[in-house]
Image: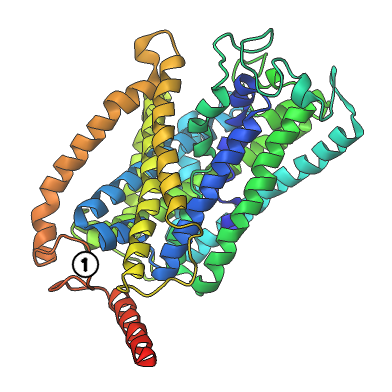
């Protein structure tokens, strides 16, 4: 259920509204292209996990294949990703609650939301899984209900408000299926490359899809569960994401979506549809699902950062207290560290919302980096497998090496598109948020990580006996390095298989 519902969140329920308005029906193409890359990402991650399941996930794989410096960078980039995302979700919870109680204090909503997911995470990994299971049920259930209603309305060509639903809305939409100009109902700044440029935003609707890699370290049977979870991704992408966007475009003109004309706030396209159908009570249901989606994201953020911080702490790349574990095996210290950041960030956002928009842009960069590490590690893993150094993973990435190379090229394009779309989002230079984050924020992150690595390098080197490089050479395990038993076992199995093959041949 984590694989099916884990990445269904505000990116789909809320973020698709403004994109539908500005891009038109062609947004379904944007979701499909990004969905293919997301599936390739999961296949690459699946090969890594079945090579060696670890709750350190990306940090552990970067350490194994590229050395301690890259493990340090990967771990802190992933922590920053979830720290900033969690602040956003807490702030979103506060806004969603005001749908019913406009005067309810936002700080109180923030603290209540955080307290709930904090208790869940501190109990056990099983409690985390149980929470995510029911959250996934709620999110998937809401999407399924919409898909059923949408299919009935589109196939029957029923009227929704002043418009009639039907497949013809895909091309009778203002500007057609793939608008190339402003048109009467579209923004005047719209261009033919809009559906391609918006890929930079669609990527983040799929964010958290990689969480299966972190959870795999605590699965009872990763060899069975991971392939099932990864293969479920393509179904989820095709039905839940692309199917939902396609139906939304068929039910109403895409210019209708975007903001609530009464409040001026961004409105979920699902709320818009049900509102036009006269089912305003469904808006309340969607608001509840939005809160659940935000809480689910918070829950995932605490779960993953606690384990990543402990992995960093074990290698002297994070404060020593991040190693502390509860009796039930929960890295509670790392979880509490992230929770403290959530509180300060969410409270700060209550006083300065524009500052947080900058933080969201930084989150985007962190997500791209994390996805890039997965593709890079898969390429290096297969290179060593082909050299006969590492045992072959039972769950192979198809189309190697081109699929991972395409994935890396796509992520590079998205970073460029993020800067371009950020430049276009405002006429005022200092409000071009995403552009500023890419051009100025990215170098700042690089400098901070360089300073951090310089600060911990001596301790890391002492802990590793001066061995800061990867675990492997092209001949086998790196000499003089104290390697994990699982790594040594893979090398021994690879060597044993090679030996038997030579005997049989002779």
Identify the residue at image location x=45%, y=46%: 407
The quarter of the picture where residue 62 lies is bottom left
Vertical position of residue 486 compared to residue 149: above or below: below
- Between 385 and 486, the residue placed more toward the observer is 385
Vertical position of residue 353 compared to residue 367: above or below: above
Residue 366: image location, x then y, percent = 36, 40
- State the SS at label 1: loop
- Between 95 and 247, the residue placed more toward the observer is 247
The quarter of the picture where residue 321 lies is bottom left
Which residue bears the numbered disc 1?
Answer: 473
Vertical position of residue 261 compared to residue 1: above or below: above
Identify the residue at image location x=61%, y=23%: 23
Q: Is residue 83 left or right of residue 468?
A: right
Q: Is residue 275 visible?
A: no
Q: Is residue 504 left or right of residue 147?
A: left
Vertical position of residue 303 compared to residue 225: above or below: above
Residue 17: image location, x then y, percent = 62, 26
- Between 284 and 493, the residue placed more toward the observer is 493
Crowding near pointer 1: few (<14 within 10 Å), some, many (20+)?
few
- Between 174 and 148, the residue placed more toward the observer is 174
Q: Is residue 455 left or right of residue 154?
A: left
Q: Is residue 418 left or right of residue 442?
A: right
Q: Is residue 408 visible?
A: yes
Q: Quadrant of the N terminus?
A: bottom right
Residue 252: image location, x then y, percent = 77, 24
């Amino acid at each position: 259920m984590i694989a099916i519902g884990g990445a269904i969140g505000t990116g789909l329920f809320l973020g698709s509204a403004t994109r539908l308005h500005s891009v038109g029906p062609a947004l379904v193409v944007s979701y499909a292209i990004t969905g293919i890359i997301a599936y390739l990402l999961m296949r690459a991650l699946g090969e890594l996990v079945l090579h060696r399941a670890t709750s350190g996930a990306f940090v552990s794989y970067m350490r194994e294949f590229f050395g301690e410096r890259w493990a340090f960078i990967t771990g802190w980039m992933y922590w920053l990703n979830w720290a900033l995302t969690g602040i956003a979700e807490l702030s979103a919870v506060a806004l969603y609650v005001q749908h019913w109680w406009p005067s309810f204090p936002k700080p109180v909503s923030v603290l209540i939301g955080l307290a709930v997911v904090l208790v869940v995470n501190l109990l056990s990994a099983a409690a985390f899984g149980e929470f995510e299971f029911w959250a996934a049920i709620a999110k998937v259930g809401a999407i399924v209900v919409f898909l059923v209603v949408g299919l009935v309305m589109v196939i029957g060509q029923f009227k929704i408000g002043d418009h009639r639903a039907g497949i013809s809305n895909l091309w009778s939409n203002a500007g057609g299926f793939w608008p190339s100009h402003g048109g009467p109902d579209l923004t005047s700044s719209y261009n033919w490359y809009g559906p391609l440029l918006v890929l930079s935003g669609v990527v983040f609707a799929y964010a958290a899809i990689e969480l299966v890699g972190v959870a795999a370290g605590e699965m009872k049977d990763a060899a069975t569960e991971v392939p099932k979870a990864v293969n479920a991704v393509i179904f989820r992408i095709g039905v839940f994401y692309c199917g939902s966007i396609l139906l939304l475009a068929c039910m109403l003109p895409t210019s209708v979506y975007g903001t609530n004309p009464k409040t001026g706030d961004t409105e979920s396209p699902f709320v818009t549809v049900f509102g036009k159908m006269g089912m305003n009570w469904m808006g309340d249901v969607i608001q509840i699902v939005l809160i659940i989606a935000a809480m689910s994201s918070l829950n995932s953020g605490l779960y993953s950062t606690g384990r990543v911080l402990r992995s960093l702490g074990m290698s002297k790349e994070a404060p020593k207290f991040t190693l502390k574990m509860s009796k039930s095996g929960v890295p509670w210290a790392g979880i509490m560290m992230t929770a403290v950041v959530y509180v300060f960030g969410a409270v700060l956002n209550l006083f300065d919302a524009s500052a947080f928009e900058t933080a969201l842009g930084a989150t985007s960069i962190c997500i791209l980096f994390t996805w890039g590490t997965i593709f890079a590690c898969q390429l290096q893993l297969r290179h060593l497998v082909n050299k006969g150094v590492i045992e072959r993973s039972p769950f192979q990435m198809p189309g190697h090496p081109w699929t991972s190379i395409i994935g890396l090229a796509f992520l590079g394009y998205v970073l460029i598109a993020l800067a371009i779309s950020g430049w276009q989002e405002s006429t005022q230079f200092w409000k071009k948020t995403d552009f500023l984050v890419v051009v100025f924020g990215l170098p700042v992150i690089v400098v901070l990580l360089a300073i951090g690595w310089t600060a911990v390098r001596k301790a890391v080197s002492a802990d590793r006996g001066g061995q800061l490089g990867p675990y492997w050479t092209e001949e086998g395990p790196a000499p003089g390095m104290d390697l994990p038993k699982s790594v040594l076992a893979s090398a021994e199995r690879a060597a044993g298989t090679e030996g038997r093959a030579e005997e049989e041949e002779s």
